[in-house]
Each structure stands twice: as C-alpha cells, then as structure tokens.
Amino acid sequence: MSPFRLSLAAAAVLVLAAGGAGWWWLGGGAGDDLLPTPPEPPRLTDSAEYERCLDMLEDDPEGARSFADSWGMEGGGEGAAHCAALATLTLGEAERAAEALERIAARSHAGIAARAAVFGQAGEAWIAAGRPLRAHAALTLALALTPYAPALLSERAMASLALDRPAEALDDLERAVGGDPSAVEAWVLRASALRRLDRIAPAAESVAQALRLEPDNVEAILERGIIRQIQGDGAGARADWERVIELAPDSSAADLAAQNMALIEAGPARR
C-alpha cells in the first residue's frame, strides 16, 4: 500500500468512544502539512514536460507547482494543470487540489481509465480535506467510468464509512476484495464495516485475512484490537494497540490506539 493510501486508511478507522459510538475523522490537508504524493499519477498526456513535472512531485512539490504554472502559461494544457493540482495536494492544500482535480477529470479528453483515476485522486483529496460527502461524489463519478476498479471501490467505501453508511461501504468492499483478494486495505475496511453492522465474527475473519497478507499492517492491528475489545479480550486489545504504537509511533493509527487505551482505562466504553 502506498504511503498516501495508508495515511487515508488510518484516517478512516473507527475507535471506541466512551459514552457512545464515535467516528474519528482525522483527515489532514487543511493546514500547511505536506502530504505524501499520490502513487503513479495517471498520464493524461504524453510529453517530456509532463514526465519531468510528475517526477518532481515527491522531492520538490513547490518546484513542481512553479514548473507546472510556467508550463501552463506556455500551453501546457491539462498535463500542466494536473501536475499543478497534485503538487497543491502534496503541499497540503487538499480542498483546493480536490476542486482542481475534479475540473480536470470532467474536462479531460484523455481515455476513460485516466479520467477515472483523476476523479479518484479528487476523492482522495476530499478525504484528506475531511469532506467525505464530496469524496463520495467524486468517487462515484470515477466508478461510473470504471465500475470494477478495486482501489476506487475501497476509497468510496472509506467515504461511506465516514458518512455512517456501513452497509453501503460493505457492498463496495465485497466487490473490491472480489476483484483484488490481495488488497489489504479493502480487507481492513471491510472488517470496520462489518463491525459497524454488529457482525463481529465475520469482521474478525476479515481483519485476520488482512494480517495474513500483511502481518505488520498497523490499520489491521488497530482494527483487530477494537474487535478484541468488543469480544471481551481486553488484554489482546491492549497488546494490539501497543504494537501499533511500536510499529508506527508517529502515525494517525498510533494516535487512535493511544486514545483507545485511554478510553478503556477511563471506564466502560461502548462501540
């Protein structure tokens, strides 16, 4: 899983909340923090300038945006606009980037798969901005173009979970794991959806499958801890959450794990 997608998976994990069910939406992008560059940006055009700009995104997003702006004024077209939008996203301006990516995808003359991928990037940006309804809409447009894309199905499921629509999320995730049984993120999100629907046994099976595929996946371990707590295995839950903090101490998943442990220590909790 790419760093960008992994950070989004962490943002879409439910934690136990003292006093009731809680959704902790940790979408970044509204501030000045840098976001990891989205993986393998789709190619809307074929030019040396486009490749150069995309290659700059990870190490020099400011430089990429400046290059894209200059290239755009010289007739760079949608390639320049796309690189500028991705640079804007990497620089942490998620909402601005999402709006730009939606416009590009809607107006592009590129192929269906590339346009769907850009709508998908807009959805990822809306998730990073903490706007799940807009994310869901963008991802629905992406899936109208490529209905069976597992990654897009997982992303829309993430938005559905943020909107408290676990049954809708589960429908997408069943299709996602059917299309790509190796998709760890989809198995983790499927476990979250099943848990939200009080289907604890299949939720446990889903997270176990994720961990068979990737034993140190921190989102999967975090989710398993939540399920273990619901099943009455407090020691197992704590062990999982401590493992999350050990594996990724500076991650959103570690923050959630610490919050879960604090809530359990503070008193009875309900999911």
Image (cartoon, rainbow, N blue to C red):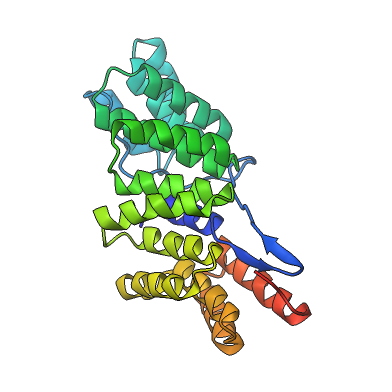
Residue at 45% in and 66% down? 191
Is 145 on the left or on the right of 266, as rendered?
left
Q: Quadrant of the N terminus?
A: bottom left
**Residue at the extreme top of the image, as rendered:** 74
Quick one: 230 or 5, which is closer to the camera? Answer: 230
Q: Quadrant of residue 116?
A: top left
Give the side of residue 19 with respect to residue 9, left or right: right
Q: Residue at x 48, y 66 (%)?
A: 219
Does residue 251 appear anywhere in the picture?
no
Q: In the image, residue 110 lies at what x, y percent?
A: 26, 22
Residue 96 screen position, x and y as percent: 56, 29
Taking depth in this image into account, of 99 and 80 the one nearest to the observer is 99
> Quadrant of the rendered structure where residue 11 is?
bottom right
The structure residue drawn at horizontal position 51% and vertical position 30%, both measured from the top left corner, is 97
User: Which part of the image, by quadrant, shows the C terminus?
Assistant: bottom right
How many marks overall?
A: 0
* Vertical placement of residue 213 versus 175, above or below: below
